[in-house]
Every structure is written in structure tokens, then in C-alpha cells.
Amino acid sequence: MRAGREETEGHYDVFISYSQNLDREVATVFQRGMENFGRPWYRPVQLRVFRDTTHLSASRNLQEEIEKALARSSWLIVMASPLAAESPWVRAEIDWWVANKRGERMLLAWTDGTLEWSREAEDFDWSRTDALPREQMQTSLAATPGCPRWVDLRWLRAQIDEHGSVPVNDPRLVADVAEFVAPVQGRSKAELIGHHLRLKRRRNRLVAATVSVLCALLATATAFGLVANQQRNVATERQLAAESRQLVAEAASIQDTRPDLARQLLVEAYRLSHTEQAVGALLGSGAVPRLLRGDGFSRAVAFSPSGQLMAVGFDGGVTLYDRGTGEAVSTLPGHSVRAVAFHADGRLLAEGDFDGRVRLWDLTSTTEPRLLGTVKPDGGVQNLAFAEPAPLLVVGTGSQVVLFDIRDPSHPKAAKTSSDMGAGLGWGADVSPDGELIATGAGSDRVRLMRLSRSGRISPLSSFSTPVSLLAFSPGGHLLATVGNDYTARLWDVADPRRPELRSVLNGHNEDIWSIAFAHDGKTLATGAMDGTIQLWDISDPVRPRQGTRLSGHTAYVGSLAFAPDGRTLASAAPDGAVRLWNVHGPQTSSAFVSLPSGDLSPQPFDPKGRFVVAGRPSTIWQVREVPEPQRLATLPTYNRGGQRVSFSPDGHTLATGVPLRFWEVSDLSRPRERGGSQEVEDSTTVVYGPDGSVLAAAEPLGPVRLWEVSDPAHPRILGTLSGSGAVSMFTGTAPVAFAGKRGLLAAVRKDREAVQLWDVSRPDRFVNTDVIPMESATAVSLATSSDGRTLFVGDSRGTVTVWNITDPHRPRRLGETERHSGEVTHLAVHPTRDLLASADQYGAVRLWDVSEPAVPRETALLAAIGSFTPTGLAFSPDGGLIAVSTDDTTLMWHTDVGALLRQLCAESAPITESQWKQYLPDRSYDPPCA
């Protein structure tokens, strides 16, 4: 619907009714023409247009507002189209107009569909007309017989669709506008158009007469105007930038507690101003937790063995979610679910509720789960665990532990209880991953360990005193974590279950711990407390555990925790509403969108389209795009325990590997095929392709850089050696080498690391050392060049990144530097199309820099915090959409496509409400960024 402005003296008011976005553009152009037609001698038409959207609620206040607007309007213009014909708002507006106004003051603007008048019937031919609501128009024609006045604006709609706009002085637009303005102004169309043309000629004469005077004033006014305009623009830009930075800070402060709102604020921050803080926050937005909502409060969560499916226990039952999309797959009816567990085959799910019922579900079809059987031990269910290979289900309640025989899941039978096992009261229970050990709480201060045979026989092994309310085995089964009512968790070595030994006590909470979970690699532990906090722990050394990130998004006790099998996602459930999905990397939160179990990246690890990457020891080819999860395609032979460098050729047809130097044809990446023989070299080599793929730079750790002619990969040949080169990074074991775009220039660190050499390699028969860039009070460690080859970035041992202009390689010129890193800058990489530099240091800090002004690099994001890992590789994909950082055994990737990140943030969050908007943007009109 559209509401017109209140009519002012001497002016007419028009109400425009339309029903779709494109009609809004047509209405806007038409409105501009009507408001300006005939100025200054005729009275301009006053209009105001609002879009009719189908999601508007039909509230009483809204209906009254529309009717008031219609009452203040003298004319009604209906934008006729099939969607308008179906719109309840357009129908209601026509009904009101016919009932309260004269029908002849309704005009039709035909924008889409079919509109045909039958002279014989004195009515529209409704067998063909679909652009108007039949019932309303027939009522109007009954009140006002005769053919309504209409204008065919389909040409205008097509023009806007193709070109985006239409000039106001377009002859067709002038004629069509006059068709409507004439009755509104009470004049003939010919009179209006004639007057319009006379005004145009008079205006041209007036312009010509005043040009000479204006020119005299223009020079002076322009000077002052430009200065004022520039100052105004600068002030506006500064204000927008300040608001953008403020929104980024606000989003960071609430991202754990109100992640949906934080995402909306980040999108709006970028929309206000593309500040480095906004860009950096978008790139790091993967750290904002996702929310899964269901029926009531959430108290239990579990991942399927494949990690693709999640089960969440709510007050109203269990909801199955697709982990990748976050969409609900199906719902299992229930009541106050307290525990959920997947069987190892992923096709059987157990869920237990507060009333003590345990249900077994067949998940062969995840969209149509089937209830198999139900049992009811005494007391509310606290935890569940499957025991393999014995077909048993272990159920812990507040009063006992019960083992159920589930060989026939449709008829589970109680096999053992805690009293049978001599365990006393059952405060929690768990089964080791191999199914051979059962740990149960015996009261609140004792743990019992028992052997479980394949036949289901239970035999006691040991018991020990410790506060216990929860317990869990590590994935390897050699550690047992126990939680008591003293705010602590304890790690016990149960490799010898007859003699368990306390390894450490974890003190990290101020209130009771309610949940505990191991990551699947056994190196990370998560504990959730009564106050809603979650503490991540690095337990790679169980004797010396270290605190990781502390998560504080929940407002109620964290009742359940679960790590996805790949360890990248931690799910937490609490009775405060939604389940939170945290992006983690070990004991730290992470903003990376994907993690590969392969590390050790080379400088050119991506194929040209960025769909595939090579990483790891041995070198493994992964598909990382256009698939829900990364897929391992093939593994290349690796003859060195320390790994090898692997690089894609620029055309993506060949892979070059070291140790020994080989070339692989990869038109089918799942079946790499060796091309020609190997070139014997010692140890791991550096392999870097030149920009056109015809030259390859290779270096042995203790030898100089050699250039190879590789136009025919089956028959590579040595072109020559860069004397004095061959410095080796102690962290990467490679020699830093960088081709300067397509300029035939190459930069290499000298063997003593005290200078960077520039080489002219444009002539394959002769290499020329053009100049040497000396290092001052530091040694060169890493190199990168801009995509145009005119800027060189050098990372050194002091943590400094220095920027050099090498447009003239005989006279390199220092532009600037930055000293944000605290250790050796081990890796540098440049975005292929944007002024974006990435740097990594020996302590794991990965930073992004805006280098649009090379003399003053500005930090935009910290992708990985200090101490999170030691990097072994850093690279952008050739299309610039991804950035990858590797450790010895892991590769993390981030999206760098801002447009894709904005779309993802909008898709993962509900629109900001008007009250939230007023809270964070009180001086701006409500305009949701994702609407």
C-alpha cells in the first residue's frame, strides 16, 4: 500500500498503490515526472509512496493509517500487474476508494501482465485480463461506467529493468505523465505538453542570458564551494567511519551473548563505512557462534559419528539438525529430554528424559525416524552411553546405573544395575571408547572402574575417592575426567585401570561444573559451569593442563557439551533457549571456516580457481570448495619424513613436488600421473612457479636457488643458478623466493640473510643481479611481491615488515614499515587482486594489512592469536577468495570475499528489530541492513 502526504493549499495529492519491488521503481520514476511536470507555472503534484509487502501485518493501526492517507488523497493510481491483482492490500485500497470516493478519479498504470478492454461488454475481457482484481474493478465500473483511464507503462518497466533508470525528459515518459497529470490538473493533455515545451524553450533562453553572469561568479563560488564540499565530505566520512568503528566494538562485546544482533551490527558497520575495523571484523566473523533454536529450553546435545547430524534435547523432544546448514531435519516427540547419545554406526539414537524414560530411535531415514523401543529405569535420566562391542546401553540416573541389553533395540532388557555391580548410588556413568571399561559414581565421593567383557559380564577393577557428579573417558580411553561439587575437574590416568593415578586438577570455574566433553583428538577438554561459562583446556600434557579460551555466552547453567568429530565445532546446550555452536581450533576459539587435518603449506598450494589445495605430510590433495565438507582426493608420494614443497602451475595442469623434483599431470586430481622422470636433489626443496608457468625456482636447503625451464614438464632443464642465494628459514626449512609479477624480476634472500637480492631473469640465457637491498639490525626471513610486481614486502627477524618500491629494480626505494609482530615474520602473502597483505610470525599471530598506501600499512584483522599455533605456511587462493594458514598438521582457511561474508551473516541471523536499531543507531532512520 502507499499513503499520500496531506494535501497542501493549491496542490493535489495522489495515492499510488502497487505490490512488487519493480513496480516501486516504475512508481518512483513516474512520481518524479508528475511532481516536476509543468513547473513553475502549474501546481506540482504531491505524492508519497510506500511499498506494499506481503509480510506486513494487517494491524488495526496500519489499516487506519492507510484509510487516513486515502481520505487525504484526491486521486488513486493503481499500478496494474498480476501481483497487484493478487495483493489483498491493493484490493482493500480499491474497495475503500470506490466506497468513499468518486470512481472516475481512479487511474490505471499498466506495468505487467495483460489488460484488455471489451467495447461490446463495456468491461474488461476477464478471460485475458490478469493485471487487475476482477471483483473490485467490476464494482468500480458499476459505480462509474465507461472505460477507465489508463497508461501502458510496460515499456518503462522494461527500460528500468535493462538500464536501471529513465531520464525525466524522455519523450515517452513526458507523454505518459501528461496523460495522468492532465485530469489531476484539470487541463487537457495537449495544453500541458504545449506548455511544457514553451517552458523548456523559455528556460533555454534564460539559461543562455545568465550564463555570462554565472561564469563570472562561478570561478569564485567554485573555489569556495569545492573547499566547503570537500570539508563537508571529509566530515561526513569521518562521522560514518566513527559510527562504523563503534558498531564493530559493540558487536565484539555482544557476539557471544547475542550473536544474531552482533552479525547485523557488523553488516551495518560495513555498510556505513568500509573501515579497516569493519573489514577485519567481517573476515573474523567466523568466531561468532551460531544459534540453533527448538521447542523450549535445550539441555542435551550430541553429534553423529559422521559429524553431519546433531541431536538436541529440548523440553518438547529431540530435534535433529544438519550441522552444515543449521536446518532442522526432523523432530522426535518427547518431554524434558535430559540426555542423547548416538550409536557408533550412526543409525541408532538413544534419548532419556526427566521422567526416567529412555527411547531408542532408528535413524536409517533421518527425515522419518522410527521409534524402536522404550525402557524406564528408576529416576530421571542424567546420561547415556553405548557400550561397544557388547550391545549394551549404559543409563545413569540420580539413584542408579543400569545396563540394558540392546541386541534387539525394539525390546531392550535390563541386564545389570549398580546394585548388581556393587557400585551403590549411580552418580554418572561412562563407557571407554573400546567398550572394555565402565566408570560409575558410587555416591558423591567415589568412582568405581569395572571391566566389561564382550559377553556383557561385569567385573570390578578398582575404586578411588574423589568428589564426583560427572565423569567422562577421553577418546583414547587412557584418561578419565571427573567433576565434583568443588568447582574443579580432575584428570585420572586409567591406562592401568587397577591403579588409577591423579594427573592434574583443573581450576577454572567459580561455580559448580555441570557438563564436560573431550575433543576427539583427546587434546582438548571443555567444561561448562552453573554460571553459563565454558572453559576450554589444552590437555595435550595431562600433567600440565593449560587454560584456553573462556566462553561466556549462556545466561543459565551449561547442561551439555559436545565436540564435532573433526574438533572444529563445540556445541553447548543450556536452559536459556538456543544451542550455541562455537567455532574452535584446539583450546581456542577460531574464525576459520574450514580446517584440514593436513598442514605444511607451500607458497602456491591452490589450483587456479581455488577449489583444490595441496597440504600435509605426505602431500595430500583436498577439495575445499563446492563440497559440504573438505574431501581428500589423492596423496602424492613423499620420500622425506620432513615433507616436501608442492606447487600448482598457473594453468592448474601440473603439480611440482620436491624430494626428488617431480612433475605430475593433474587433469584428474584424484589420479595424479607422473610426467617424465625425477630430477635428483637432496632433502626438501623450495618450488615456486613463475607467473607464466614456464620457469620454476627450486632450492635445496643448503644450496642456491636454481631456475628450471618447465614449459615441457616431461623434460625440464636447468637454466642457471642465482649465486649467493639460498638462505633457509629455520621455521619453514625453505628458501624465501618471490617472482615480481610478470616483470621478469625475482627476489631472493641472500644466503647470509643480511640482504635481499633482485635478479633480472627475463633472459633465460643470462641472469642479472640488479641490486641488493641491505637489512638493518635484522635478517631477512620472508618475501612477497604485489600483484603488479612493483612493491616488495620483506619480513625480518625483529618482527618488522618493510615495504619497498621496486619499480626501478636498479634503485629500490624504501616506502615504510610496520612493527606489530613480536617475533620473526616467517611468512608473507599478497592478495592477487586487492591491496591486502597477510603476515604470520613464529608465535602464531596472523595479521592482515591494508596496503593501499604502501608507506603506511594499516592492520585490518588478527586472524589467529599469539600462541595459538606455529605457522608453517601462508597463502591466498589465486582468485583471492580464501586465505590459508598451516601448522605442522593442520590447515586453517578463511573467506576473504566480503560480499560472500555479508550474505552469510545475513543468512545466519534474524533482521535487527526497530528497538535494537534505536539502541545502537539512535540518530538514523530504521533501515535494516539485510532487508
Image: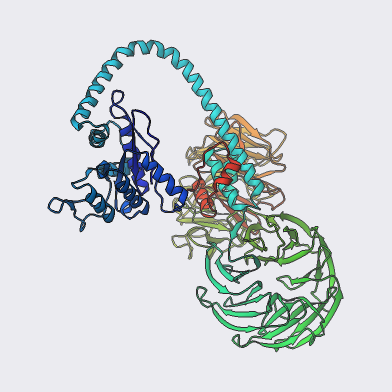
Residue 392 on image: x %, y %: 68, 84
Picture quarter containing residue 203?
top left
Name the image quarter holding residue 828: top right
In this rendering, the count of numbered labels is: 0
Residue 195 x %, y %: 22, 25
Residue at 66% across, 75% down: 353
Q: Position of residue 288 (x, y in %)?
A: 62, 52
| In the rendered image, the vertical position of residue 710 relative to residue 37, given as above or below | below
Residue at the outermost left position? 120
User: Does 899 appear above or below 533?
Assistant: above
In the depicted structure, whether residue 118 falls above or below residue 321 = above
Instruction: Give the colour scheme shown.
Output: rainbow
Q: Is residue 605 visible?
A: yes
Residue farthest right in this picture: 465
Above/below status of 696 relative to 794: below
Q: Is residue 301 left or right of residue 621?
A: right
In front: 753, or 279? Answer: 279
Q: Residue at x 64, y 74 (%)?
A: 341
The reply, left or right, for residue 641 in relation to residue 191 is right
Query: In the image, residue 840 lies at what x, y percent?
Result: 65, 46
Is 55 on the left-hand or right-hand side of 96?
right
Q: Nearer the viewer, residue 488 or 776?
A: 488
Residue closer to the observer: 633 or 16: 16
The quadrant where residue 887 appears = bottom right
Q: Confirm whether residue 847 shows in the render.
A: no
